[in-house]
Amino acid sequence: DTGVSQDPRHKITKRGQNVTFRCDPISEHNRLYWYRQTLGQGPEFLTYFQNEAQLEKSRLLSDRFSAERPKGSFSTLEIQRTEQGDSAMYLCASSFDSYEQYFGPGTRLTVT
Amino acid sequence: ILNVEQSPQSLHVQEGDSTNFTCSFPSSNFYALHWYRWETAKSPEALFVMTLNGDEKKKGRISATLNTKEGYSYLYIKGSQPEDSATYLCASPTNFGNEKLTFGTGTRLTIIP
């Protein structure tokens, strides 16, 4: 399968714990995006990378969130000291330059 | 702040019937309009990217139209099938570079066999 993959698909964690998600984009894509979808809402932009450079971060991305794309390939999104409000579907997408964004299946996070 | 809205929020359609739903967006500073189909437990799948006023695109039984002057797009499904059951999302980028998509809340379509 050459699409965007995300791991894990589901994560249940206790409030206060740290979690890390991984996204593997389509191999020739230089851009990688993170979005978050909460219940009843559409996906909301969090951040994006062009190669290894993080070029924009949403105000939604508090100090507890950090994203990296160390070699311009896969990316990780870490949430520290999780809160119940962080429960959501975290989606990753990739594109080649400004062309269409291709999405992964998402990681569903539940914070108890 | 770009405001993208979709209606209706949910829709139940009898198998074989045709249906349509709406995405509205600000007509000023328009760059593109994306439609995605998102089936449960799968990745959102890109259906169309539309950029020109009056654009019409078709993919099998699904088609879409775009009116950038009045700020809306319609998605049509002809002869609905159970596999069409999904959430249909529209999104518009906030800039020409297409990096940051603003999504609507989606239309959840259920096809009744």
Image (cartoon, helix red, strand yellow):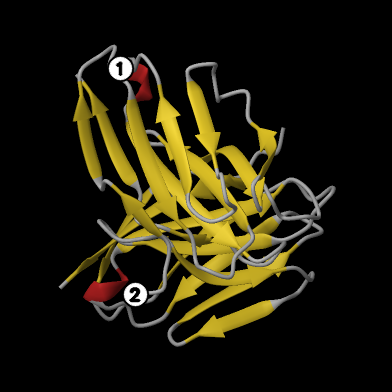
Q: Is residue B88 left or right of residue A63?
A: left
The Cα atoms of the two marked residues, 2 and 1, are separated by 33 Å
Find residue B110 and report its horizontal and vertical position in percent: 26, 61
Callout 1: residue from which chain?
A
Q: What residue appears at the point 84 percent right and 47 percent down from the top-left corner?
A: B28
Asked if both marks, 2 and 1, belong to the same chain, the answer given is yes
Q: Is residue A98 left or right of residue A62?
A: right
**CB within 8 Å, label 2 to label 1:** no
Q: Earlier in the sequence, mark 2 or mark 1?
A: 2
Find residue B15 and report its horizontal and vertical position in percent: 23, 76
Callout 2: residue from which chain?
A
Q: Quadrant of the C terminus of chain B?
A: bottom left
The amino acid on which the numbered mark 1 sits, given as a three-letter code, is Gln
Q: Residues within 10 Å of mark 1 (few under 14, many from 20)?
A: some
Q: Is residue B20 left or right of residue A17?
A: right
Q: What residue appears at the point 47 percent right and 17 percent down from the top-left corner?
A: A64
Which residue has dot 2 on it?
Answer: A1
Labels in figure, total = 2
Which residue has dot 1 on it?
Answer: A84
Q: Tell me the SS state at disc 2.
A: loop
Rendered image quadrant of residue A22: top left
Nearer-the-camera pick, B14 or A61? A61
Q: Quadrant of the N terminus of chain B?
A: top right
The amino acid on which the numbered mark 2 sits, given as a three-letter code, is Asp
Q: What residue appears at the point 78 percent right and 55 percent down from the top-left corner?
A: B97
Find residue B92 and report its horizontal and vertical position in percent: 66, 52
Checking the image for residue B30, the label placed there is none
